[in-house]
Image: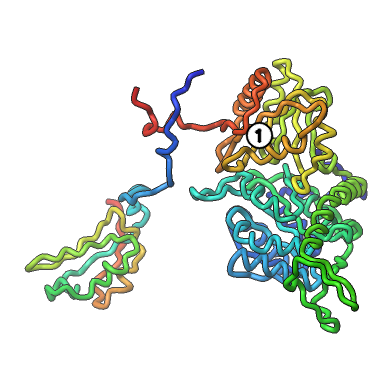
């Protein structure tokens, strides 16, 4: 990422934490309702938004609610009145919202929620990993992962535009690593409000409950069968869910379109909008990762390249809809992929690991894929860890043995005295 | 590469057990300490197990009731008393005064 001068030649660079970058994006996106509940490490997002509203920089309603479940429910209700809405959360806050998430996607509400990622208890942790992010992957939300604070700002603005596009109408999560990005300050270029307003016009919602001249009830009990009456027909649940899936699949096109429009207007891109690549032009060994894991992997590239390995990184930005087609195109012909997951599908493998394997299923020239788990609960991911994973992955590729479990790198079991075996 | 397998079943729930002074002697945090006037203190002067508000309200459980057959005393643990003054506030007999302790 480079901070380039914006096309309209005005520079507003602020040193912002990831949380505040998200808050500024909400301010400039003219969000109308924010229902907030605090949780480490996202609280500064909603605190900053409340500052903006209190001092008149943002004309919005700020609802302090009693829990994240209420925050999500309030987002759904507020969105259904035709308003641009959003909030932020982390870890168990997101889990508490879980009940409302399929409600939001099923009713096609363009809500944007920022997720400062945080490990799930138990045991209790405040540090980052990506588990909370992956646990909601099946509820029909668009999911982005940001690798730096500029991306947080840019992606939030794009997220509203994508979510509100009539070809989409879906809610979106914009995620970034807790503490690593949420609380770390970086230069972020803020754009002129006029330019943002041009890029992101007011929301034209398909629902408007605040218009009481035409009363409607949203989300009645919807039967398994289609309604066929002389007055007209209505879909059954199955058709609504089909439409949701189709829209989520097709949203990739709009995500790319909005990304490219943003790049044209503001001079900044995030890879191709789906993933970023580092040193992959001549690479046949690829490290596949998200967020802080991809960032850390970059520090290992120099050493690995010095070993003569033709190795590069793919940093995934778009997680849902999972860009299977684009990944198949990229990975066809590559020899080895080493996946580092800062999450795990317990009882199976790292989520990125098995989702990539599934996406590349049946590829004529599919690479060998080996997955590793790293950094759960904020365990530091070191350059040495990445190098270890790459070496182990290449060893596994030599034997060609395919296993469906992931090795954990960076464990410190040996330092636990109660685990020392008697001979 | 033969590695002795660790018995991961030895790692179950993350459980804490209470100990005294995990954060060090927090009594050093304050220069204010409670001074007890035994002549005013209701249980001490009456010899009856009454009141004990200071024991009840101390947030750090720094006050101990010592109830013997023929006498009652209150022991204040100055190692962990943080000088919050709640005991002074809650004493109905005004038997506790927060005093400043200055190093010699």
Display colour scheme: rainbow
Extreme-bottom residue of the structure: A213
* Residue at image mark 1: A340
In the displayed structure, does residue A176 sit left or right of residue A194?
left
Q: Vertical placement of A260 versus A54: above or below?
A: above
Residue A393, x across and y down, in percent? 65, 24
Question: In the image, what residue occupies the spot 67% across and 68% down?
Answer: A73
Would you say residue A266 is visible in this rendering?
no
Q: Is residue A11 left or right of residue A387?
A: right
Q: Quadrant of the C terminus of chain A?
A: top left
Q: Nearer the viewer, residue A197 or A341?
A: A341
Residue, x 72% and y 68% (percent of image)? Answer: A76
Q: Is residue A357 left or right of residue A417?
A: right
Quarter-of-image position of residue A350 = top right
* Residue A5 visible here: yes
User: In terms of image quadrants, where is residue A409?
Assistant: top right
Find numbered disc 1 in the image and state the secondary structure of the residue it sits on: strand
Quarter holding the N terminus of chain A? Answer: top right
Picture coordinates of residue B20 (x, y %)?
A: 30, 50
| Apparent side of residue A232 relative to residue A379 in the rendered image (left or right) | right
Q: Label 1 crowding class (10 Å Cα cut-off): few <14, some 14-19, many 20+?
A: many
């Amino acid at each position: 990422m480079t901070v380039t001068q914006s096309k309209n030649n005005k520079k507003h660079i602020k040193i912002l934490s990831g949380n505040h970058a998200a808050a500024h994006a909400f301010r400039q996106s003219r969000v109308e309702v924010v229902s907030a509940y605090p949780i480490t490490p996202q609280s500064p997002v909603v605190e900053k938004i409340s500052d903006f509203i209190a001092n008149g920089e943002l004309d919005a309603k700020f609802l302090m609610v009693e829990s994240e479940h209420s925050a999500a429910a309030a987002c759904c209700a507020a969105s259904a009145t035709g308003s641009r809405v959003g909030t932020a959360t982390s870890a168990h806050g997101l889990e508490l919202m879980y009940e409302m998430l399929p409600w939001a996607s099923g009713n096609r509400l363009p809500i944007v929620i920022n997720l400062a990622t945080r490990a799930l208890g138990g045991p209790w942790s405040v540090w980052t990993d990506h588990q909370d992010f992956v646990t909601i992957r099946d509820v029909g939300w668009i999911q982005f992962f940001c690798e730096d604070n500029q991306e947080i700002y840019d992606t939030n603005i794009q997220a509203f535009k994508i979510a509100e596009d009539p070809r989409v109408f879906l809610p979106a999560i914009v995620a970034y690593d807790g503490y690593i990005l949420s609380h770390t300050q970086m230069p972020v270029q803020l754009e002129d409000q006029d330019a943002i307003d041009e890029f992101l016009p007011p929301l034209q919602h398909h629902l408007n409950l605040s218009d009481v001249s035409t009363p409607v009830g949203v989300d009645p009990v919807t039967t398994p069968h289609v309604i066929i009456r002389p007055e007209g027909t209505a879909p059954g649940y199955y058709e609504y869910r089909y439409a949701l899936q189709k829209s989520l699949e097709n949203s990739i096109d709009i995500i790319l379109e909005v990304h490219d429009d943003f790049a044209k207007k503001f001079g900044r891109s995030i890879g191709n909008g789906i993933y970023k690549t580092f040193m992959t032009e001549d690479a046949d060994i690829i490290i596949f990762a998200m967020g802080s894991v991809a960032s850390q992997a970059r520090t290992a590239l120099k050493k690995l390249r010095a070993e003569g390995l033709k190795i590069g990184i793919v940093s995934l930005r778009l997680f849902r809809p999972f860009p299977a087609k684009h990944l198949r195109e990229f990975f066809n012909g590559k020899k080895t992929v080493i996946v580092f997951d800062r999450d795990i599908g317990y009882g199976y493998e790292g989520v990125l690991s098995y989702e990539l394997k599934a996406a590349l299923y049946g590829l004529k020239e599919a690479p060998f894929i080996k997955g590793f788990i790293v950094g759960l609960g904020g365990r530091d991911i070191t350059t040495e860890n990445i190098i270890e994973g790459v070496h182990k992955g290449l060893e596994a590729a030599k034997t060609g043995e395919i296993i469906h479990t992931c090795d954990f790198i960076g464990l410190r079991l040996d330092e636990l005295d109660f685990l020392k075996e008697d001979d | 590469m033969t590695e002795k397998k660790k018995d991961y079943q030895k790692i179950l729930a993350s459980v804490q057990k209470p100990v005294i002074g995990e954060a060090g002697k927090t009594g050093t945090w304050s220069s204010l300490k409670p001074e007890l006037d035994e002549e005013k203190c209701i249980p001490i002067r009456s010899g009856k197990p009454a009141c004990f508000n200071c024991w009840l309200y101390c947030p750090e459980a720094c006050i101990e009731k010592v109830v013997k057959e023929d006498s009652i005393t209150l022991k204040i643990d100055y190692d962990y008393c943080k000088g919050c003054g709640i005991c002074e506030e809650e004493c109905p007999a005004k038997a506790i005064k927060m005093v400043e302790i200055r190093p010699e």
